[in-house]
Image: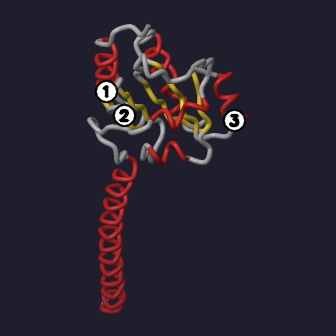
Amino acid sequence: MDLNRKIYLPMIIVIFLIMGFEIIILTYQNRSLNSILKDRHIKMSTGLRVGDKIANISDFFESKLSFKFNNDSALELLLIFFSHDCPACLKGISNWKEILAKSEKRIKPIGISLSNESETTDFLKNNNINFDIIIDDNSIITDNFQIRSVPAKILLNMDNVIEFIQIGAGSKRSNDELMQIISNRKELQ
């Protein structure tokens, strides 16, 4: 009996030591995970804020769109940043279509694709999307607008001031907020 006690006691001590190390490792990993999540949250947000003015917006888009900016008629834009292989983008398509249907003649939607031209063309065709698209596979526009995650929507008023920013698919509340802002707009000429 004394022999069993001598064997079990060291085993129990070893088990407690292993459990102690596991607790320390898990605690460290949890802290690391929390810091990673905080960093990811920061990187997913945009550096732009509601109220920021975007200078010379026509320089970004003029040569790439089917319409021309006109100094006589101000234009409000809804910029939709997306990628063909983004699950949240695919999930948000019905929301985009709903917003565009309800905002017809109030704003001008412009899609900004981070995918190449053939991937974007397939994405648009497969999802029946038909608004002006700019291919930004080099992320020039995306970088200038400080977008770090897609999907993203930015609503610019006639003075090129940001009135709404949404990073990610968005909640029903944020989508309703965007629709409220848009529904208060006058119809475009």
Residue at 35% x, 23% y: name it: 158
Residue that label 3 marks? 119
> Which of the two discs, 3 and 2, labels the residue nearer the N terminus?
3
Q: Residue 175, percent across and down?
A: 35, 23
What amino acid does circle 1 point to? Ser
Disc 2 crowd rating (10 Å Cα; few below 14, some 14-19, many 20+) is some
Residue at 54% x, 47% y: name it: 140
Q: Quadrant of residue 28?
A: bottom left
Q: Residue 160, percent across and down?
A: 36, 31
Q: Quadrant of residue 16?
A: bottom left
Residue 183 vs residue 84, the one in the foreground = 183
Q: Residue 64, percent across and down?
A: 61, 31
Residue 186 vs residue 41, the one in the foreground = 186
What amino acid does circle 3 point to? Glu
Disc 1 to disc 3, C-alpha distance: 29 Å
- Which residue appears farthest toward the front when viewing the image? 72
> Which of the two discs, 2 and 1, labels the residue nearer the N terminus?
2
Disc 3 crowd rating (10 Å Cα; few below 14, some 14-19, many 20+) is some
Residue 56, above or below 15: above
Q: Which mark is residue 166?
A: 2
Residue 158 vs residue 113, the one in the foreground = 158
What amino acid does circle 2 point to? Gln
Q: Which mark is residue 174?
A: 1
Q: Element type at marker 3?
A: helix
> Which of the two discs, 1 and 3, labels the residue nearer the N terminus?
3
